[in-house]
Image (cartoon, coloured by chain):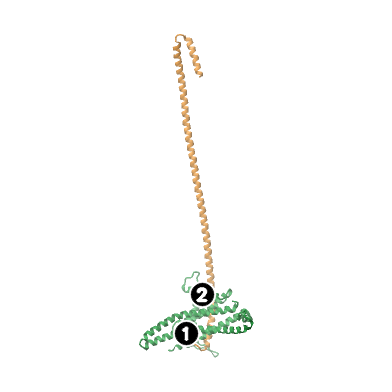
Chain colours: A green, B orange
Amino acid sequence: MHIAEEFMLHKIIPINIGGFDLSITQAVLWMWIASIIMMLYLIYCSRSMTVVPSNRLVTLFEVLIDFVRKDLVESFMHGKDVERFFPLIASIFFFIFASNFIGIIPGTYTPTANINTTAILAIFVFILYNVLGVFRNGLVGYLKSIVVPGLPAPIIPVVFVIEVFSHFARPLSLAIRLFANMMAGHIIIGVLIYLALLATGAFMGGIMLGSVSFAASVGMYFLEVFVKSLQAIIFAVLTSMYIAGAVAPEH
Amino acid sequence: MMNFEFGLEFWTIVSFLIFFFLFVKFVVPPINSALKEREKAIAGAIEQARKEREEAEKLLQESKRELEETKARSSKIVEEARAYAEEVKKDIIQKAKEEAQKIVDSAAKDLERAKAEVIAELKVEVVNLTISLTEKLLEKELDKNAQTKFVTEYLQKIGKN
């Protein structure tokens, strides 16, 4: 066994269309499982919302929805934009949340621990907010809004170039932040488990080291739960911020 | 995990877009309608509470008014009873006075009658006395004729009195 093997993609259903390898790997499979479970939960809860909250599962759902609406959307947007973009931000949050969390079940594959998954989502967000910005302000207006107004004329081009770079850094940081966090936790837990397994069988006193590293792995496991939630929130928050900045540059 | 996987990227974006579509189609409308319903229910409950409070207020006012009325009525009744009692008292006193007056009056009448009787008796007595006295005085000097005349005159005089 090898830790790197954890992250290898195995084709389950090989599909090849026009030279493109669109095979269903275990990453895709677990993503689907996670998304389907999440979507079923969301649909069930949204349909069983009662006037007076009674069901705990539904109450948790309401708390999450309320959190996304208030803290992730209303903090950055105003008026009709809240209702307009809430579904998108919520979808991003729940989708990534599901993909992150499927990984806490041993033996699964965390889709978001793969750079490809996070990169395409980040690129999607990048394209989306720029397109929205152009739609809202017109191409010229949007390009103007990139630079902070009120700067002396000579340094405007310089600032513009820097700002453009920072815009391109956004999807990169989005993608790497999520993927690295998901992968790192996994690797650390893996390493600790291997250490525990190796140490217990390897030498005198290894039981001690083994127990310690096993305990640490359990601790990491719980830390992972926190990290997975946090990363889903961060991705959604940044998406919300980027969209808000693009559609309403004055803020 | 770090190499380019077109398949994974393709399926990720497809899955996400489907997820987004399902979310918009099946999750957002029920949330919105549920929230609207909740708002309505809360507004309704507030309205209901307001109405009930007004009702209670009204009832309180009414009961207060009724109490006032009752108090007024009871004091009136007491007043009337007192007036009646006063009247009865006066009546009784009046009657007693009348009774007393009657008694006094009848006593006076009796007295009057007694007085008259006494006077009458006295008259007879005086006549008799006078006769006897006169007889004694005029025993020998008066004859029978003169005697009778004298007595008759005297009696007439007394009768006038």
* Above or below, comparing residue B145 to residue A81 in the picture: above
> Residue B149: where, in percent of width, then height?
49, 12
Which dot marks residue A184? Answer: 1
Residue sitting at 47 percent across and 25 percent down? B113
Residue B131 placement: quadrant: top left
**Does any portion of residue B13 appear in the rendered image?**
no
Query: Which quarter of the rendering shows the C terminus of chain A?
Result: bottom right
Quadrant where the N terminus of chain A sits is bottom left
- Quick check: B109 left or right of A163? left
Task: Give the spatial CA distance, label 2 vs label 1.
Answer: 27 Å
Instruction: Say few, some or many: other residues with alpha carbon within 10 Å of mark 1 (under 14 / 14 to 19 / 20 or more).
Output: few
Q: Residue furthest bottom?
A: A19
Q: Secondary structure at mark 2?
A: helix
Total numbered circles: 2
Residue at 50% from the left image edge and 14% from the top image edge: B153
Q: Which mark is residue A67?
A: 2
Q: Chain of mark 1?
A: A
- Mark 2 belongs to chain: A
Residue at image x 48%, y 36%? B95
Under tag 1, what secondary structure?
helix
* Residues marked 2 and 1, same chain: yes
Quick one: which residue is furthest to the left in this view?
Answer: A204
Residue A45 horizontal/vertical position (percent): 49, 74
Amino acid type of the residue that numbered disc 2 sits on in the rendered structure: Phe
Give whichever of A76, A154 is nearer the camera: A154
Q: Quadrant of residue A167?
A: bottom right
- Amino acid type of the residue that numbered disc 1 sits on in the rendered structure: Ala
Mark 2 surroundings within 10 Å by alpha-carbon count, few (fewer than 14), some (14 through 19), many (20 or more): some
* CB within 8 Å, label 2 to label 1: no
Residue A100: mark in rendering = none
Image spot of residue A245 (x, y percent): 58, 78
**Of pointers 2 and 1, the one earlier in the residue sequence:** 2
